[in-house]
Image (cartoon, rainbow, N blue to C red):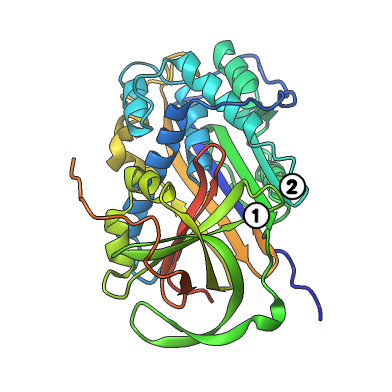
Amino acid sequence: MLKTQLGKTCGIFLLGLLLLSPVAGCSLFETGEGLAAPVEELDERLIRANNGLGFNVFHELQQANEADDNIFISPSSILTALGMAYNGAEGETRAAMEKALQLQGMSRNEINDAFADLLTILQNPDPEVEISVANSLWGREGLEFEKGFILRSREYFKAEIESLDFNDPEAADVINNWVKEQTRKAIEEIVEPPISSDTILFLINVIYFKGEWSEQFAPDLTNEMPFTLPDNSKTEHPIMLQSGEFRYLENELFQAVSLPYGKDERISMYIFLPTEDTGLEGLHEELDAEAWAKWVNSFASMEGEVGLPRFKFEYETSLNETLKTLGMEIAFDEDNANFSEMHPIPPNLYISDVKHKSFIEVNEEGTEAAAATSVEFGITSAPETEHFRIIADRPFFFAIADDMTGSILFMGSVTDPR
């Protein structure tokens, strides 16, 4: 029997920044160096920021999207790209970004050190898992940027820093070819040509993940089964099946199972299947960083059966309005944004566009991915039965997380696996 091709998962995040008028100057662009050796510990405050921002962005997108839309984002990609932009912010803009990114209480040096550590710790030596994080800055040729900003981008984020003639009709292709290479062709375009004459800088983060399941699904067990769509209609779809011992959690809201990748099982996909009474919307209302941490720590090993649909989709969105809602509105204000640590004022520099684009494919072999109210409810570490059965045959939430650090790399919801 032919093997299925290993799926892909990747996320890419782009910030476009504009000047109100062109400025002449000399270029400070240089290429970054390789990563340092992996650190043993990571600042927990950055993990909380990563997961907290991820759920906040996810909730805003979930409310803005149609009920039957699949959603897929990379919290790590979003936070890292905005972390680079944060290094150029000052005054009210810097304070607003710290609040929106949930980095309050950390100094700029602590934040940068944590990002640098995260880059090293995501180097995964597991032969069956690949994680790649790449950052780049693309500046308009002939413009001058603050030396400290360039040095921090290179030192802490290992960014590839390039000067490019944005007036050249092929300039967008140069950037897109870099993206295509970093995502192993999963994402081929993030910058649309022609580049605006007002754009002076692109900050780009790419996170790429490719992992084989620790225990793969046998292709001959995959069956066509009905999948219930949000409008309660049904569609026949391939559901992958396997039995064994898994980390499992069940409560009045959902069933959840953890499916690890690779030999060391450090990275896992978490599937949260809401009960029929709760539904995906009801589960979304309870999802936040605090609930996530509580739930993930409550999983327990148990024998059971797992059914997961094959799925493959792309997701693309602008995060401008989302980030404004989360408190970053001043960073988009062409009159009041303060990125003086990035470029001298005047003229003024502000964020003009924020794009997030992602792709995921999940199959029998694994995944390749090139993105104050308290509700009390009881949590049981395991159901009373000694055996479980979870078949994701209706809309569900999922996340791909680094269990060593607790950082969520990707999260999304599947309403239609086709």
Mark 2 and mark 1 lie on one chain; the one further toward the N terminus is: 2
Name the residue located 34 percent from the left edge and 33 percent from the top edge: 100
Name the residue located 64 percent from the left edge and 21 percent from the top edge: 154
Q: Nearer the viewer, residue 60 or 217?
A: 217
Where residue 55 appears, as percent x and y from the top left, is 37, 47
Secondary element at image label 2? helix
Q: Amino acid at mark 2?
A: Glu
Disc number placed over residue 270 in the picture, else none: none
Q: Nearer the viewer, residue 18 or 407?
A: 407
Label 2 Cα crowd, 10 Å radius (few <14 / some 14-19 / many 20+): few
Where residue 173 appears, as percent x and y from the top left, is 69, 47
Q: Note whether 207 is above or below 334 in the view shown.
A: below
Give the quarter of the image for residue 289. top left
Name the residue located 33 percent from the left edge and 43 percent from the top edge: 290
Q: Note whether 262 is above or below 120 in the view shown.
A: below
Where residue 267 appears, as percent x and y from the top left, is 60, 48
Apparent side of residue 31 relative to residue 414 in the rendered image (left or right): right
- Would you say residue 258 is visible in this rendering? yes
Q: CA distance from mark 2 to mark 1?
A: 24 Å
Apparent side of residue 110 relative to residue 11 in the rendered image (left or right): left
Apparent side of residue 361 relative to residue 411 in the rendered image (left or right): right
Q: Nearer the viewer, residue 239 or 203?
A: 239
Q: Amino acid at mark 1?
A: Tyr
- Would you say residue 19 is visible in this rendering? no
Name the front one of labels 2 and 1.
1
Apparent side of residue 265 relative to residue 203 in the rendered image (left or right): right
Where is mark 1, residue-wise? 261
Q: Quadrant of the N terminus?
A: bottom right
Where is mark 2, residue-wise? 181
Q: Note whether 290 is above or below 39 in the view shown.
A: below
